[in-house]
Image (cartoon, rainbow, N blue to C red):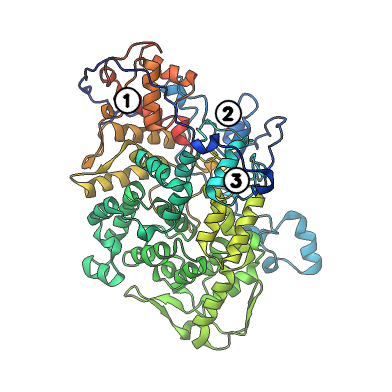
Amino acid sequence: MPERLFSDDTPSSGSPKKVKGAFFADYTGEFPMPRVLNEPLPAAEDDDYDYEPPPVAAGPAPVAAGTPAAKTSKGPAPAWLRTGRPALHELMRNRRQALWALGGGAVAIGGLGSGAAAMLGRPEDADEMVKTGQGGGNISPRDAGSFSNRDSSYTSGQGDLNDLGAAGTADSASAAAVAAMRATPRFPSPLNRDPVLHLLRRCTFGPTQADVAAVKELGIDGWLDQQLDPDKIADPVAEAALKTTPTVTMTTAQIRAAVKEGDNKAMYELTRAVIARQVWSTRQLYEVMVDFWNNHLNITSPFDGGWDTRVPYDVNVIRKHALGKFSDMLIASARDPAMMRYLDNTSSDKRNVNENYGRELLELHTVGIDGGYNEKDVRNSAYLMTGRTATREGMFKYEQNRHWTGAVKVLGFQHANKSAKDGLAVGDAYLLYLATHPSTAKYVARKLAVRFVCDTPPQSLVDRLATAYQQSGSAIVPVLKVLFRSLEFWIAAGLKTRRPLENFVATARVVGTKPGTDTGKALEDLYNFTRKLGQAPLGWEPPDGYPDVANAWSSAAGMLETWNSHRAFLQQSFKGLNNPRADSLVTQPAATMATYLDVLCNRLIFQPMQPAERDALIKFLGAKPDTRVTDANLGGKLPNLAPLVLDSVYHALR
């Protein structure tokens, strides 16, 4: 069993066998700067980058009261905390002090729901409602004072970061990377700004040595082009691992034939397949987008009613359209039995309209609270969706005798809706209207910017992405290409915090965990561990998906379990997998303890630590920086040292 931090569990009594070795040669421990950054900038007349050197900041902006930084800081908060990340620096004095520095884990939920806010309204609107008779169904959640989205409730005191230090769009992703590297970040991060590493931290579930080599071979532009065409990428390791979860490729009929009615086996296998794909798939950007859309059009797994439908939803709605058009994905979701069951549309008909799906369609799936809809729009949205249901056999069905008929108006969409037999087509037209609405473009664009750039992205970037969304008819790849050609993406190194599941998966990837003798049992163990982390795959029960900002994941308990996961991977806890031994991590020679730590850090976090942090680790070993190293396993201490590197800020950020 691994050593667990601050636990009643006793560590394993035996230490790894000491390995004798020769003196190591000195090693610089520096990740090389890309050659292109040593080349001159293009001539001014050819400069399409549209950025200016950032002004010198007068000082960090204040942190909103109530945020973790505001509660714990004894002095001015670092400026980069305004991106939404918790206080993650000043690590490694010892493990107990590190408790105060790292964050992750359970989620605190706050804020009124949009429906409640719309019905209550703002206090200052009360007199006007009495005078005019307006209000109630005529008040939009936006005007009633709701947060524009759930994540913004965590970052509301921080505002949009309209100046990250560089802005604009270049002709290619690599050109944008070069331009951003020549600029000075307004919010510096402890992470190395190497663009290869930054690309991999954002577009994969964690860099590996093989990923770094692939980007260097293909170039940034070539690697992105390859990742955006995932069907052409061989994926043998993930596909082999998925043989242990056979139901994840089955149709509803096949699941019903293979699984006892009501048995959640297929849904549980789906959650394990998520881990397998995120850890081992070579189609990493595709899997990142699958995760993004699973949160945007969230259906928790498992859920009541999903035993035979949740897996096909993943296949036919999310994975099929993850790099396609959002309009196609939305229409597919509105014809999916899992969605109809999850959001109660199966209990909605013309005599008893259930507003749940009609509301979430507006609030979460498309225009968002800022779209300006009101309670009457919600009601009409629900009317339009009546008749869409799921059969007992787990099939989608439109039952026209249950469809509400009559004139409807939602935002700018109007229809006479006279015939029940045409109700499905009318609903599809409404969905297409929503999918291509300017507010949907802004809503999706902002969520993509939050995912790939920072917790409070610049509005100018969001606007550019929204324009690309509208010009492409909701196609996602063109939007991603604009994002990756933006200087804001490349200047934002380290301005995102890994959520617990992302940290867990990144650990498995960087240490080199591979499928083994009992991958199925191991995936079950991995899944059970993610539940302790507070972020089991597909496990968020409300329909709004897991939060994607750092302040939502501040938890001492979650942080400790995240640290324990580092020990679990490096101390051979997960049986049935091929877990490399800790003593295989340092293969390059190093003569002194200081250079040894640089080699180890480059292996696990792709950069050396700052000298003070490195010296704290050396002190933990009871050594000095110039202590000569003769044993690659440090006398059995490496399995306890290596997890501390992963506990650091460098692995917590991305």
- In the drawing, does residue 3 fall left or right of residue 539? left
Q: Residues within 10 Å of mark 1 (few under 14, many from 20)?
A: some
* Numbered tag placed on residue 588 in the rendering: 1
Residue 180: x and y, percent?
59, 40
Question: Disc 1 residue type?
Answer: Gln
Between 302 and 43, the residue placed more toward the observer is 43
- Toward the viewer: 183 or 3? 183
Residue 454 appearing in the image: no
> Which numbered disc, 2 or 3, marks the residue closer to the eye?
3
Which element is circle 3 on?
helix
Q: Quadrant of the N terminus?
A: top left
Corner quadrant of residue 24: top left
Q: Position of residue 289 (x, y in %)?
A: 45, 55
Please indicate whether residue 348 sits to the left or right of residue 238 in the image. Answer: right
Q: Residue 68 location, x and y as percent? A: 57, 34
Q: Which residue is mark 3?
A: 487
In this rendering, is residue 277 above or below 637? below
Is residue 233 placed above or below 212 in the rendered structure?
Answer: below
